[in-house]
Amino acid sequence: AFHAAVAEGGLAALYRGFGVTMLMQAPAVATYLTTYEMAKAKIPMPVTSPLLHLGSGLAAESVACVFFVPMEVLKQRAQIRAQGTSSTEILRDLLRNEGPSALFRGYGLTIAVFGPYAMLYWVTYERLKVLLREMRGLPDGDDNLPTFDILSSAAFSAGLAAGATTPLDVVKTRIQTQNDVRLNTNAGSEGRIVYKSTAHALSSIIAVDGWRGLLRGLSARVLWIAPQTAITMACFERLKQMFL
């Protein structure tokens, strides 16, 4: 996939959807992390309870999807369109042909994908922090871990969660991009599968591509999410220590 993308559009092809991501990522991540911390403080459970981290992660993802879903819809369409197509053009085509509701297409499905991702990520990350505190002889609740510990814990947790939820992400991406006007025009109507539901999309992918089709993009997904999350969490943990 990497070589095909570069061969088709050069190195610039790897950055399709960059503008949309930059615009939406900051408020999305800020909402996500704030909601997680607020949920942890409000849910009446021990701070080390995996159930607390599961519930807080799901709450954070559910709220932040108000930003994440439109970002995903526009970013994915930018990535599958020809080089040179601007985010503004993609947004204009989407609103003209599908209406504003198309920006939130797959909202429930996105939560079904990133909800489990967030739950698995936070349970693993919080547990790794406990283990690292014990290894370094730090008291319970002390988050003043070395930056390397935070980076490695976040990267491992994010990579694990991203890999485990790749099949769900494949289904979500197919559903969110199937109505793109340019994609349909270029591909033609013959032989194009129109997914009627999540179950139909799942069965169609397996029928056409086999079970391996559900793992398409796994390495790219892990290589994108793991370092991004590691850097985000290192900054977040340091800012928490400075201001809270």
Image (tube, rainbow, N blue to C red):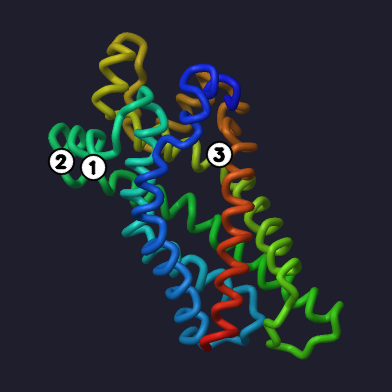
Q: Residues within 10 Å of mark 1 (few under 14, many from 20)?
A: some
The residue drawn where x is 55% and y is 72% is 236
**Where's residue 208, x and y in %?**
51, 18
Disc number for residue 201: none
The residue drawn where x is 42% and y is 35% is 16
98 to the left or right of 201:
left
| Badge 1 element | helix
Amino acid carrying mark 3 in the image: Pro
Are the residues at dot 2 and dot 1 in contact (C-beta closer than 8 Å)?
Answer: yes
**Where's residue 107, x and y in %?**
34, 51
Residue indicated by mark 1: 102
Residue indicated by mark 2: 99
Q: Residues within 10 Å of mark 2 (few under 14, many from 20)?
A: few
In the rendered image, the vertical position of residue 82 relative to residue 169, given as above or below: above
The residue drawn where x is 49% and y is 26% is 205
Amino acid carrying mark 2 in the image: Gly
Are the residues at dot 3 and dot 1 in contact (C-beta closer than 8 Å)?
Answer: no
Amino acid carrying mark 1 in the image: Ala
**Where's residue 123, x and y in %?**
64, 68
In the rendered image, the vertical position of residue 97 relative to residue 227, given as above or below: above
| Badge 3 element | helix
Disc number for residue 167: 3
**Where's residue 33, x and y in %?**
48, 71
